[in-house]
Image (spheres, rainbow, N blue to C red):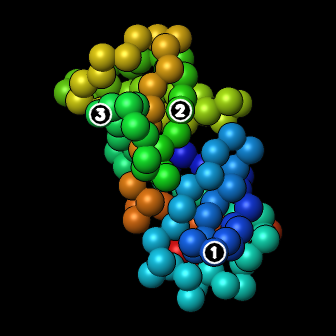
Amino acid sequence: MNLVDCTLVEERKGFYLAAKEFRIPLPAKMSSELRSYIDAEVKMGIRPEDIYESKSSEGLTHENAIRMTLDLIESVRPYLLLHLRAGRIPLVATVKHTETGVSQETIMEMDHSKIHLFDERTTQAIM
């Protein structure tokens, strides 16, 4: 599982996870469970299979899209493990195919309904 240090923030449109290099919106259904963690440090967890390569970067409107650099492609048949970096934040994604080459930028999207949150202090799962 990818683990990223984040701060939970609330804005007009809802809750976001703010990492140093990106922001990810959280589904509205999570809001009641998160209210006590506003402005708190949390760990975001997301499995490699829940990070997808975006089909197109033209007219990018997805709030859960992140511009990343591909550092390494590891073949683990029938999948590819993409070792990515959003600034200094490393992430791994599992895909079946990529046209992105090593050292190139790509747009990745997270399935925000599959995000796990952990309390930074206690390490207990929030959700």
Residue 105 is situated, as x and y percent measured from the top left of the image, at 50, 20
Which amino acid type corresponds to the residue marked 3 in the rendered image?
Answer: Lys
Mark 2 sits on what residue? 67
What residue do we see at 52% from left, 39% from top? 66
Label 2 crowd bin: few (<14), some (14–19), many (20+), radius 10 Å: some
Q: Decide: marks 1, 3 in contact (CB < 8 A)?
A: no
What residue do we see at 43% from left, 49% from top? 62
| Of the image marks 2 and 1, the number of the one nearer the N terminus | 1
| Of the image marks 1 and 3, the number of the one nearer the N terminus | 1
Which amino acid type corresponds to the residue marked 2 in the rendered image?
Answer: Arg
Which amino acid type corresponds to the residue marked 1 in the rendered image?
Answer: Arg
Q: Which mark is residue 55?
A: 3
Instruction: Please tell me whether residue 56 is drawn above or below residue 51 in the rendered image.
Output: above
Q: In which quarter of the image is residue 91?
A: top right
Secondary structure at numbered mark 2: strand
Q: Quadrant of residue 75?
A: top left
5 vs 127, left or right, is: right
| Nearer to us in this view, 123 or 83 | 83
| Nearer to us in this view, 56 or 100 | 56
**Disc 3/disc 2 C-alpha distance (Å):** 13 Å
**Disc 1/disc 3 C-alpha distance (Å):** 29 Å
Mark 1 sits on what residue? 12
Q: Decide: marks 2, 1 in contact (CB < 8 A)?
A: no
Q: Residue furthest left?
A: 78
Q: Residue furthest top?
A: 102
Residue 86 is situated, as x and y percent measured from the top left of the image, at 61, 33
